[in-house]
Amino acid sequence: MSKSMPLSILMLGNHPDALVKLQQWKEAGALSSIGIWEPSWEGTFDCDFHIILLASKKEPYRKKAQSLQRPEMIVLDLDTFWMLELLITQYLELQALSKDKQLFQTISRYSHEGIQLVDASGIIQYVNPSFSRITNIPPEERIGKSIYEVSPDGALVQVLQTKAPVIGWKSTGHGSVVEAISNAAPIFVEDKLVGAVTTFQDITEIKHLSLQLRDREQKISDLHDQLSHAHAPSYSFRDIIGESQSIARTVETARKAARTRSTVLITGESGTGKELFAHSIHAESPFHQMPFVVVNCAAIPAELLESELFGYEKGAFTHAVKQKLGKFELANEGTLFLDEIGDMSFHLQAKLLRVLQSKEIERIGGLKTIKVNVRVIAATNRQLLDLVSEGKFREDLYYRLNVVRLEIPPLRKRIEDLPALVQILMKRISRRTGLNPMTLTNKGSALLADHRWPGNIRELENFLERLMNESSASVIPDSLVHLHISKLLGTSPVQAEVLPSANTDAPILPLRTLEREHIRKALELFGTSLEGKKKAARSLGISIATLYNKIKAYHL
């Protein structure tokens, strides 16, 4: 998004309080245009908008936001509206300061701070009180003296010699160490030069005002960075699918952790949903309206990760042409999610430990420490204790991170959640890819339980997307599911447990024997209680009544 103001904004939905604010900002000149969209409106917009404000979280508005969003556009919702309010406030303050500067410049050019008046021969006739205040020269030491003696290089001498005005003349008069900027003009009476007058001011005040402006401009730039990098969480605990005991216990621990600012360490195999838990913890925290910033430690080169985390000052290195806020500052009062923490360099681990201990950061090239209040959530699919033993991960950092521990169970340990996961994932795939909605039969779902899913939910989602792309029917044929599962089982350890090896001379077993063994294993996995039998029936793709009949028939 361009950093020029004013901005244009499109509000999806109608929120009266937000609309009042937007109209006030437009009247103040901070917004150029405001648009409001409702699902019933079918027209087009005649301008490009810088910002989309999602005033409603209902599906039609979310879809519209997705269809309109471009890389240079910022999408905010009511939870992150405060950042826009802060940006506009800073902008209006900057505008007011700019007006003050313009007024000051006008006064300094045509009116008076310090005033000095000379006659045609250059004898000083008058100085005002501000002259003495600025130069520390009392009037009696100035009046009656020749300007050619006390300020030979000043603006008044130039005017007397040229009989023309002088604007913006820099000089330091005799008897004073103050550097001044002067405007001077000749005084004519009936076309005769009778003298000259100068108005001047201390350059220090202009420099001070310029520094103030630069500081405000830097703050505006920082706020733009914050708007560009801060994100609301994309998921909540409602998006975590499953009723198994293992996932339920993990969710319960995560909900408790969400209520505090304690550091959380999330571990688990790749594809189990560690980032989903991180988003959910922030979404349910008391500070959910504050920034949620994500850093993937494995995706950023080690030499760049330090500047990403801690920021840098202007001139800190060759290409540091402006100050940049680090992710810790961007996440202040909110959450910083450090994904793949096990890949962080040993050098950076020491700096991270210091931040966790002192709640302070120091920008690269900076001389001052900056207080930050950030909850850190770290995640990894690596065994950190093994890395500690190998000298690749700091033991003290491990214990600092391991305050609240969440171990996300792999899919093979929550197979009973497969039917629900399949249903939700297929709907998600359909929305994301544009494929027609599809389902599996009970038998097709049951076939999935034979695989151990080493890639976990990510592997399952890719597998289902492959089926949906190859199927021409809305109900995916069992034969297609069986074909792809067989390919997976060709290298899966589960095949060795269930089916005879293709390289042995073992006889082909009757279907009745295979069915009895399959039911027995399902009962071992889910238990023989009523609830366990219901889960076993769902996993096998049969009704509970059919399961009871087969238990009786097979004497299980």
Image (cartoon, rainbow, N blue to C red):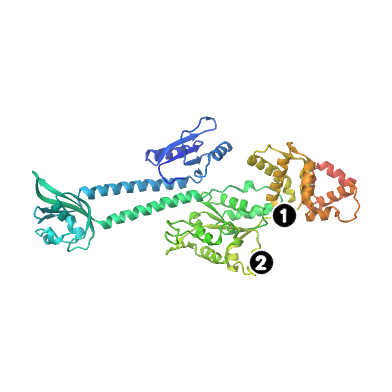
Tell me the number on the disc at residue 386: 2
Lateral position of residue 367 relative to residue 202, left or right: right
Q: Give, as a three-letter code, the residue at label 2.
A: Asp
- Rendered position, 464 above or below 326: above
| Residue at image mark 1 | 454
Q: Position of residue 80 (x, y in %)?
A: 50, 46
Q: Image quadrant of residue 392?
A: bottom right
Crowding at mark 1 (Cα within 10 Å: few <14, some 14-19, many 20+): some
User: Would residue 554 be seen by someone viewing this image from the given angle?
Assistant: no
Looking at the image, is 181 positioned above or below residue 468? below
Q: Using the image, determine if residue 128 lies above or below residue 364.
A: above
Q: Nearer the viewer, residue 246 or 207?
A: 207
Q: Is residue 92 left or right of residue 488?
A: left
Residue at disc 1, secondary structure: loop
CA separation in Å, label 2 and label 1: 21 Å
Estimate the x, y position of residue 258 in percent, counting from the top left.
Answer: 58, 53
Q: Nearer the viewer, residue 172 or 552?
A: 172
